[in-house]
Amino acid sequence: MAVPNRSQLHPGLPVAIVQKQDQRSGKLTEGVIKDLLTRSPTHPHGIKVRLDSGEVGRVQEIIE
């Protein structure tokens, strides 16, 4: 499963992210996007975002 592109993401969208400290375990954190932090249209490890809760990580999937 490919990680979402920047064009698929926007503030208010529910997503699952992997935080820096959870990269080895692959533990996902769910939340709602507050800010997009990566400027490039794609990133191999996922677009970096800040959630409403203040947590920062790379988007692994969009929650339906």
Image (spheres, rainbow, N blue to C red):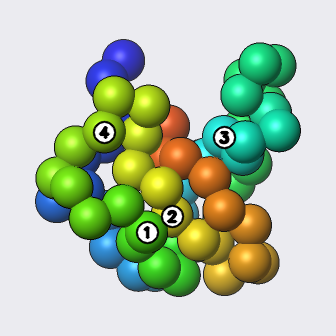
Which residue has dot 2 on it? 49
**Could you tell me which secondary element the residue under label 1 belongs to?**
loop
Label 4 sits on residue: 43
User: Do labels 4 and 1 touch, CB within 8 Å?
Assistant: no
* Eye-nearest disc, 3 or 4: 4
How far apart, in angstroms, are the residues tagged by discs 3 and 4? 14 Å
Q: Is 40 on the left or on the right of 4, as rendered? A: left
Label 2 and label 4: CA atoms lie apart by 12 Å
- 24 vs 17, nearest the viewer: 24
For image coordinates 72% across by 45% down, the residue present is: 19
Quick check: 58 above or below 38?
A: above
Query: Is there CB contact under 8 Å for labels 2 and 1?
Result: yes
Q: Amino acid under label 1?
A: Leu
Q: Assign a secondary structure to mark 3.
A: strand
Residue 26 lies in quadrant: top right
Q: Are marks 3 and 4 in contact (CB under 8 Å)?
A: no
Q: Which residue is mark 1?
A: 37
- Badge 4 crowding class, 10 Å Cα cut-off, few under 14, some 14 to 19, many 20 or more, is some
Image quadrant in which you'd find residue 10: bottom left
Work out whether 41 lies above or below 12: above
Q: Position of residue 59 (x, y in %)?
A: 49, 47
Residue at which label 3 appears: 18
Q: Amino acid at mark 2?
A: Val
Q: CA distance from mark 2 to mark 1?
A: 5 Å
Which badge, 2 or 3, is on the more N-terminal residue? Answer: 3
C-alpha gap between disc 3 and disc 1: 14 Å
